[in-house]
Image (spheres, grey):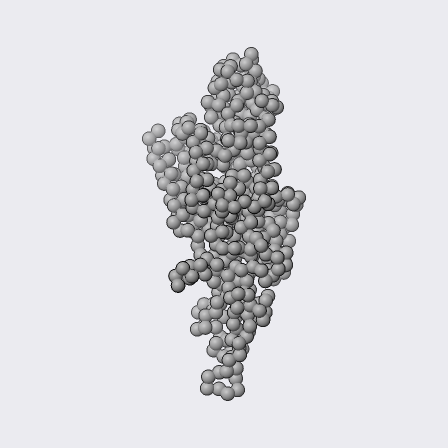
């Protein structure tokens, strides 16, 4: 049948495009990964997209990356603004992983999914308001986020309470992002993922 | 055909097993009170999860009573992509390999895989629509080379390539947690099946089937033929879900079992045989 061959051709092109898409698009670097990720490259090489970590998260913070994420489609990720990682004491997602894509975390300060970065233009603490929300909700308060007291310009009595993030201590759980009081024009705190850090390093 | 129905009702039992496999992964999701397709929304308090149930996971990896199971072909892709080997993963692969190794590699295809169930439904639809397609368009061993190609690509590209394209994922993981991986592949498989050739994907292209074809070179359960009884009517070949040629040697009297690794123990040939010359026997 002649028509059948054309349809087979179309089907082959579809699958080839799908495959090429996952290779060319690479892995989307903005995806925030579950705790226990070592590096994005290591994670992508090991993750078989079985979804067990998603099914193990008691806060349903893990969801599946959509089809437009290249080779990362189908992998687990966190939307920190929606539902951040709660850094469970026993890390059920890590325990569920069959291929060690998530591994080597024992205590709550172990994971490094990324670190939080504050946009000074939008964060109201920089404008002099006493907010402290990110600081107060941080599971590693006074380690990952500290308050830096700065005096106000042209003012002798008031102080700015500037949240300051320790890149080294921040786990990247994203609870500060979830709870940030500001959303307009955009949320002034976000997690710089491991993949983004790697990109920034190669750029500089 | 209608007057004698003595053989074990393989097709019906197999369809029941296929549906059970499709549904069983959803049971822990229901038990936990989670929604299908990944729509569960969490709160500030920890809640019960599917992982709290004694069985959960997907066809790629699952846990039963704390014992981990892992798709052996996904395992191979992970090993070559990451150039590493975790002991956990190895231990999780062994039960699956032993199970299918003892039975027959492609018993997975015939009894477990949801895509095979879908293709059988499409077969039925195409028959109703009276669309004619070619019986064989690609050689059955092609899938072994596809499997090898997937492993080479996974090695070079450093990610498990078939896991990013698998149509099995779309059905299985789509239902469980809303993964859309493999949707385009599944669409292509359906198109090809409807308009080009009979069972092209399962017979000739699926790398997982290719992997299990290699595993199927061993296995204790085999379709055996009684050469004395066989009348050479070839009805078994017409019914075969795998490829008619795997029955050539037994029907010609050159072998006593279907030796090809391709056999998925679907039982279609046994049901089709008018003289009960075929049966499943233990040992080879």
Q: Quadrant of residue B278?
A: top right
Residue B121 to residue B249: above or below: below
Residue B279 to residue B53: above or below: above
Q: Nearer the viewer, residue A109 or B177?
A: A109
Q: Quadrant of residue A145?
A: bottom right
Farthest front residue in view: B84
For the N terminus of chain B, the quadrant is top right
Q: Is residue B43 left or right of residue A192?
A: right
The number of callouts visible is 0
Residue B26 percent coordinates (x, y): 59, 44
Asked if residue B4 can be seen in this view, the reply is: yes
Residue A131 to residue B51: above or below: below
Q: Nearer the viewer, residue B74 or B34?
A: B74
Residue A76 percent coordinates (x, y): 52, 52
Q: Is residue B271 left or right of residue A14?
A: right
Asked if residue B74 can be seen in this view, the reply is: no
């Amino acid at each position: 049948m002649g028509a059948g061959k054309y349809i087979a051709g179309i089907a082959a092109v579809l699958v080839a495009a799908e495959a090429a898409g996952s290779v060319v698009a690479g892995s989307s670097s903005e995806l925030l990964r579950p705790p226990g990720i070592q590096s994005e490259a290591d994670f992508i090489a090991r993750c078989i997209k079985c979804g067990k970590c998603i099914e193990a998260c008691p806060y349903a913070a893990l969801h599946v990356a959509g089809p437009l994420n290249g080779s990362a489609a189908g992998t687990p990720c966190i939307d920190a603004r929606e539902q951040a990682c709660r850094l469970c004491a026993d890390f059920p997602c890590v325990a569920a992983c069959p291929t060690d894509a998530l591994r080597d975390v024992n205590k709550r300060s172990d994971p490094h999914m990324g670190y939080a970065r504050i946009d000074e233009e939008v964060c109201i603490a920089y404008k002099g308001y006493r907010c402290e929300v990110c600081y107060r909700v941080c599971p590693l308060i006074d380690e990952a986020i500290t308050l830096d007291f700065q005096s106000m310009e042209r003012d002798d009595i008031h102080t700015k309470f500037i949240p300051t993030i320790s890149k080294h201590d921040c786990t990247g759980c994203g609870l500060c992002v979830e709870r940030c009081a500001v959303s307009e024009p955009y949320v002034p705190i976000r997690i710089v993922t491991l993949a983004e850090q790697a990109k920034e390093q190669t750029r500089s | 055909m209608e007057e004698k129905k003595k053989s074990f009702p393989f097709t019906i039992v197999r369809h029941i097993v296929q549906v059970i496999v499709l549904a069983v992964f959803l049971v822990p999701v229901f038990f936990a009170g989670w929604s299908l397709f990944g729509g569960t929304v969490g709160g500030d308090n920890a809640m019960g999860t599917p992982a709290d149930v004694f069985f959960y996971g997907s066809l790629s990896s699952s846990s039963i009573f704390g014992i981990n199971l892992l798709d052996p072909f996904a395992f191979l892709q992970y090993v070559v992509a990451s150039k590493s080997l975790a002991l956990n993963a190895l231990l999780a692969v062994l039960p699956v390999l032993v199970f299918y190794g003892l039975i027959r590699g492609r018993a997975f295809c015939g009894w477990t895989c949801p895509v095979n169930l879908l293709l059988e439904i499409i077969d039925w639809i195409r028959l109703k629509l009276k669309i004619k397609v070619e019986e064989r368009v690609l050689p059955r061993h092609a899938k072994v080379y596809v499997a090898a190609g997937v492993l080479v690509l996974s090695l070079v590209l450093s990610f498990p390539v078939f896991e990013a394209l698998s149509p099995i994922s779309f059905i299985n993981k789509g239902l469980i947690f809303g993964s859309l991986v493999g949707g385009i592949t599944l669409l292509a498989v359906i198109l090809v099946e409807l308009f080009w050739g009979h069972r092209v994907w399962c017979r000739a292209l699926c790398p997982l089937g290719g992997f299990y074809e290699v595993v199927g070179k061993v296995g204790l359960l085999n379709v055996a033929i009684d050469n004395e009884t066989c009348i050479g009517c070839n009805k078994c070949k017409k019914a075969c879900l795998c490829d008619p040629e795997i029955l050539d040697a037994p029907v010609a009297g050159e072998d006593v079992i279907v030796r090809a690794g391709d056999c998925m123990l679907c039982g279609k040939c046994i049901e089709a045989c008018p003289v009960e010359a075929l049966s499943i026997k233990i040992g080879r």
